[in-house]
Amino acid sequence: MNRRQWFGNTLGTLGSAAMATLEAKSGGLPGLPTHKPTAKRVIYLFMSGGPSQMELFDYKPKLVDVAGKDLPESVRNGQRLTQMSATQLSFPMVPSKFSFAQRGQSGAWVSELLPHTAKIADKLTFIKSMHTEAINHDPAVTFFQTGSQIAGRPSMGAWAVYGLGSESENLPGFVVMLSTGGGGGQPLYDRLWGSGFLPTKYQGVKFRSVGDPVLYLSNPDGFGADNRRVFLDALKEMNESKWEEFGDPETATRMAQYEMAFRMQSSVPELVDLSKESEATFQLYGEEARKPGTYAYNCLLARRLAERGVRFIQLYHRDWDHHGGLPKGLPARCKETDQASAALIQDLEARGMLEDTLVVWGGEFGRTVYCQGRLTADSYGRDHHPRCFTVWMAGGGVKPGVSLGVTDDFSYNVVEDPVHVHDLQATIMHCLGVEHTKLTYRFQGRYFRLTDVHGRVVKAVLS
Amino acid sequence: MKVILGRALAGAVWVVAGCASGAEVQFNRDIRPILSDKCFACHGPDAGNRKSKLRLDVEAEAKADLGGGRRGIVAGDPDKSGVMQRVVSTNKTLRMPPAYLGHAALTAEQIDILQRWIAEGGRYQSHWSFVPPVKAELPAVRDAGWALNAVDRFVLARLEKEGLTPSGRADKARLLRRVTLDLTGLAPTPEETRAFVADEAEGAYERVVERLLASPRYAERMAIRWLEAARYADTNGYQSDGPRDMWRWRDWVIEAFHKNKPFDEFTVEQIAGDLLPGARLDQKIATGFQRNHRTSAEGGIVDEEFRVEYVADRTETTATVWLGATLGCARCHDHKYDPFPQKDFYRLFAFYNNVPEKGFVYNFGNEEPFIKAPLPEQARRLAELEEAVRVAQGRLDGLAEVARKAERSWEKRARELREDWVPSEALGLRADGGGEFDGKRELEIAPSTEVRLNFRDPFTFAAWIEPREGKGAIVSKAEDYWEGTGHGLYLVDGKLRLHVVFRWTDLGFRVETEEAIPLGARQHVAVTYDGSMKARNARIYVNGRPMKMKILFDQGIWPLDPKEPWRVGAGGGLRFTGKIDGVRVWRREMAASEVAAVALAEPVSAIARKKERTAAEREKLRLAFLEWGAPEELREARALLGQARIARDEYYETIPTVMVMEERAERRPTYLLKRGAYDAPGEAVEPAVPAALGAWNPEWPRNRLGLAKWLVARDNPLTARVTVNRFWQMLFGVGLVKTVEDFGSQGEAPSHPELLDWLAAEFLESGWDVKRIIKTMVMSATYQQESKAAAGMEERDPENRLLARGARERLAPEMVRDQALQVSGLLVEKVGGPSVKPYQPEGLWKELASGEDYKADKGEGLYRRTLYQYWRRTIAPPSMMNFDSPSRETCVVRESRTNTPLQALNLMNDVTYVEAARKLGERMWKAGATDEARLQAGWRVALGREPNARELAAAGKALRQFRQHYGAHAEEARQYVSVGESARDEGVPLADAAAYAAVGSLILNLDEMVTKE
């Protein structure tokens, strides 16, 4: 598609000119959606580092009987190990230190670490048979977010906005927010919300908790909004003179972008101004939600972004990488995220938005049944495990109260209904009304897509 | 009839538009794009994916009998051709391309042209880009007077065929700004503009072009696109994204463009400079090109998986940059569109598969292989310091006789010494007592804060032991469990073992003696290490004799500093049984001779009394003498030598290194990797180039040097075309082949094939003269046209592919910033050197990764050209990413331009531009006495022209409003003019300074300012 054709070329159409992911309502591709969407938007709660499925959702009572014993070779079955495990002399199995119970009508297993999530278990759809191909963080997160372990492909949000455009006039269509536990955790990379080979305007816009919520949003010190208006009026007048002289649609587009920038200067502060949120809201999300940069705050913001029509809202919470000291680290991460995750679902539902918002929760892989690091009476760790792990979804088009997939007694292998990363991606796109094989971009002579040449929609979880 | 294709082929509209009905259909121009896009995936080169016997990418096969007389294509008879029957079929299960794969039917136009082609004989052509370029005869044109050179003849011929006329020559000032930005990345000064406008003599424009090409700025401008292609950056690019130093390579590139190194040499040196006979330092530095790829230091990665990834990256980058080939598609299977079997990928891969390298790399600097790459002045300084060491050594040698005499006389006194000698240089710990250990006892000899050892610190540990059991700790500063972090000397299965561990599983090193040591015997044990991060450079000694050593683990590349005390008899979860005493820790690596001396139980006094002495005894006596008994003169000479060595060594450390290519002595075998997976080797392959792309000269060596020679061989069909096309893209915004990265059958065919070939052939004939070919382009009338679109042309040719006007394009990302710095007077021009850190919003590094946040430089580092900006790949500079810069993670050659509100915010509010606006405002204010004169000065400085009346009125009105505002709000004015590090010119009254800063910002935000027109 040609950039100039794309923007139209008369001043009359400036209102619909577009930005990065500030794609106007008119954005998106012809022919999309391919079918009636069940979700208008996605909120993806990414737990970076790889939360342990065995301590949270994948209940394995039989492990108690084999605690401390070596993982049988028949279970490992030649599975490749990270370099970290490869030098390990033994692979003693460790059961979860934390207790489990079946929750709600659906009877989904949720551990004591997630009491709030447990309460809304009937609203969730668990996929306990997720599996991936990568065993290290960088390639694994990149795989989840872009469909390829190799850098250079567009992220899921970029695909969504490229294909469907945005419904927000004044906010980006793809927003990213970050939070971390105490320890920092695994780093993240701009490529995870990048546009890859798509034009850069589709990249996710990071909403930050330090400094400007959006980079370069605020006017310089000593240059107030009144001055900015004077400035923009003069700029418009001069650019109009250029437009009349040259008639280059790029000039017209640029003028529209300055107006859009000006609107963002008020829409973004309005977005992050929580003063009108009720006390009940803070009770729901927790007091942490008042503190910029926390996961709870980001969840609340996610709801506000969803209300304003943002297409793809991506949260990351870091530091789930528990190679050692899991019994201390994991509860801390859960405490930081559990209440707000559950609150988001409840809040969306109360506002009638859960039905057209798809919420996804999960990490880049799971963790091993065998211990890594120092195994003591109180402490243990687990290595990366790509063969099975759990994610949950809720809202727009997925069937609540379902647990799909079964793993073996060691939470090592999937025994029923495996769901690959590309399958999950295909399913997310399906909910957005996009048949994943139809959303392609020709680059280097090939029609690329989010799901590469794979992926099948997981129909069993669709409502 | 004009044939207009559907959206999927919109890119090819310029090509096909030429094929009016009646003209002969051309395979490459008209047919290949259809077959490739619609048929090749299942009926093309990929044997594994071929859905039937029919193959359409090879003429003979397309026309072959498939059985029962069925043929895909029957020359001259569309009705009998299977292809035609299937594409027109209304039966959905028969129709091609198949609906079940999501394909739509061919359009009526596509069907029509296929039919005509078959009717005309269905003749194939070799793919255009696989045939070496030759100069076609210059086409005849009606308006011959317009053409200034060959470029124009091709362009004009096409325009005339379309019934179009070229635009007039651009206004001189505008042309000067265009060509100055294009060739140097910076704007002309008002003086340059005045001079050029006034210069009406013959050749004025050519003289400007010559001047610009000779400027070092030209080299900087050319370099940045090459850096993007080379995925050059200052960090490793995966996960924690540690730093690296490749700026010496970057500076090599700048110098190469400045000196106009012919592109063939430029190629050969970067691909294989190290393999040239008598390779010079600069030729080795050049090979950094293929070490610029990302590397991973993520804990737990499988080494081979990533090593393979690096080799694949080099292979794909070579294919993109030189061949315009999407060879990466053949990494997992045969290419689906171009004639590259999967084997071709691994044959090319094999050239790059012989580097002595690892997949898991050092996270705190350059990974091997790398070389010291001193700048000329550093080489001189180092030579001086070497000389100083030689002089000091000479002086000491001159005292040999004095020393011998003094030592003899000291020996007599030494017989009476009561204390034995222990080397005091860098002695960190000394625990003489120790005693009996019962398998439980532990002795803490120093707190964790005393004598800290990190992973790059050299050390020597020594002790006397008398073990009764084969397992125990001797001395350690390590967590007290087996896999714990820290340094430890242990006994395991009777063997001596050294552990230096950060994380047991993957970071640290461990060595042990091959043989067990005897139990029950008193013996001296020592270990030394030089801090080189290599297990093989550790040594284990027993009774002063080096032991044969086995390396158990070798990744000592990560810092460690456990908060553990120094313990004797304990550590690593082990306890000692037996006796330990005389524990020493030195913070240096002892030579073997010194260890032998230290291992002697006999005190100095006893040795001094002996007549016959062993070598070790002589050494012990000598070392003790030097420390205790040397005369002043000797001490001084030794001290001077020591200082000279330190001065040299410290200076040596400051000399930059650069990662380079090297060859392993023994060639690493290469295998085709099934599905591209590192752990699924198939058949073995030898280094070779893709058969479809030209012949191999048997005189070339089968290594990277041969590969490089092949790339720039006269009959290589691609390198010259691909290269001149990138230059064209740089100047005109879009390549003659728009898909600059893909010259294959899915790529776009050239808009002006004969022009592309003429330029490529010209480039070759000129001896790959880069400046000359670029000069040819900018000297053309085509380039010099007015960039304003004639009526209707914006709609008819929005991307200006027909070249009926000059280019009007937003500036490249780095130019937006460089130009702002330049017109404000802030730009600091200095070629080369380590990367610098300009302004960047706080917290960007911190919010994504642990470790230090980005710290902007002070002073000139803020104002250097963007080319020198520190580039962290996982968190690339946001102001560059906002303006469409590639992230430098992978090779990118296509230039991209978007237009977004984030760019508006960036230009309005980023410190860089606010400060530049203020300095531009000061310049304006000082350039005149009235507002009007000052505003005019602003336009002249920034845009090289006078403002028009409308601009003057708008800017003047805003200026007055700003001045009024700041006149009433001095505090705001003070804040506003304090943005940025540079001092404000106090000579400008405050309200004026602020108001002009705001107007400066207006200018920097003008559409024209960020546009080349």
Image (tube, rainbow, N blue to C red):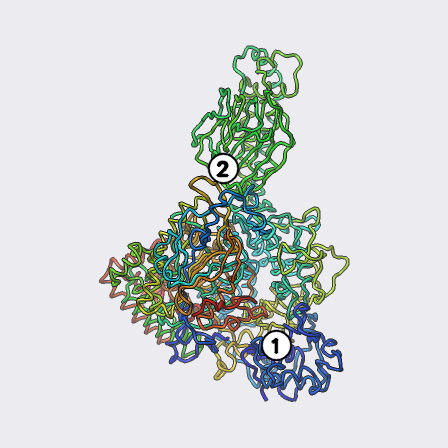
Residue B322 visible? The answer is: no
Distance from disc 1 to disc 2, alpha carbons, whole Å, reads 60 Å
Rendering coords of residue B823 (x, y %): 42, 62
Amino acid type, mark 1 = Lys
Rendering coords of residue B646 (x, y %): 53, 33
Residue B190 placement, left or right of B332: left
Q: Nearer the viewer, residue B746 or A159?
A: A159
- Determine which quarter of the picture holds residue A257: bottom left
Residue B679 visible? The answer is: yes
Q: Is residue B209 above or below residue A136?
A: below
Q: Secondary structure at mark 2?
A: loop
Residue that numbered label 2 is attached to = B484
Q: How many marks?
A: 2
Q: Nearer the viewer, residue B401 or B840?
A: B840
Mark drawn on residue B510: none
Residue that numbered label 1 is attached to = B38
Q: Is residue B475 above or below residue B225?
A: above
